[in-house]
Amino acid sequence: MGKWIGVDLDGTLAESNGKPEGTIGKPLKPMLDRVQEWVQAGQEVRIFTARADSPLERLKIQRWLEKYGLGNLAVTNKKDWEMQELWDDRAIRMKPNKGEPCGECEGKSKFSYSCCY
């Protein structure tokens, strides 16, 4: 396997209903179109979700992906050295090897922290 892009499911590729398990929301068209474009260009894309721990949830995800033309995508909750990007609605982008958030992400965390950088 080569380099791949991770795409979160709930809140990124599909509308989030606020519940960790259960139904999967409607696709978010801009992201669905983006993922379909990547796949058509030969880019490996994997659905990166906490739901991947449950065999039942994985089955629901695969059915949802098939319904929206992405049935060949892998579903995982594990990163490896081949993942080149992660598209996620909760991630805070960090400066590599610095332990600090990038400028545009600074102050976006819902959690307070004290640091003198």
Image: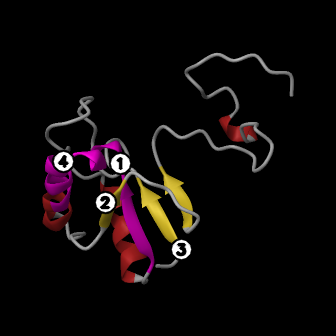
Mark 1 or mark 3: whose residue is earlier in sequence:
3
The spot of residue 22 in percent (x, y) is 14, 37
Give the labeled residue for mark 2. Answer: 75
Of the residues shown, which amino acid type is indicated by label 3? Lys
Q: CA distance from mark 1 to mark 2?
A: 7 Å
Above/below status of 105 relative to 87: above
At x 61% / y 28%, what residue is drawn? 108
Of the residues shown, which amino acid type is indicated by label 2? Val
Name the element at disc 1.
loop
Q: What segment is highlighted magenta in the picture? A: 43-62
Evaluate if marks 1 and 2 touch, with contact meaning CB atoms under 8 Å apart: yes
Q: CA distance from mark 1 to mark 3?
A: 18 Å
Could you tell whether 117 is left or right of 24 in the image? right
Mark 4 or mark 2: whose residue is earlier in sequence:
4
In front: 64, or 98?
98
Q: CA distance from mark 3 to mark 2?
A: 15 Å
Could you tell whether 19 is left or right of 114 in the image? left
Of the residues shown, which amino acid type is indicated by label 4? Glu
At x 53% / y 74%, what residue is drawn? 3
Q: Residues within 10 Å of mark 4 (few under 14, many from 20)?
A: some
Mark 3 or mark 2: whose residue is earlier in sequence:
3
Give the labeled residue for mark 1. Answer: 49
The spot of residue 97 in percent (x, y) is 78, 48
Q: Residues within 10 Å of mark 1 (few under 14, many from 20)?
A: some
Above/below status of 2 relative to 21: below
The spot of residue 54 in percent (x, y) is 22, 46
Give the labeled residue for mark 4. Answer: 57
Name the element at disc 3.
loop
Q: CA distance from mark 4 to mark 2?
A: 10 Å
Res. 85 image quadrant: bottom right
Q: CA distance from mark 4 to mark 1?
A: 10 Å
Could you tell whether 99 is left or right of 109 in the image? right
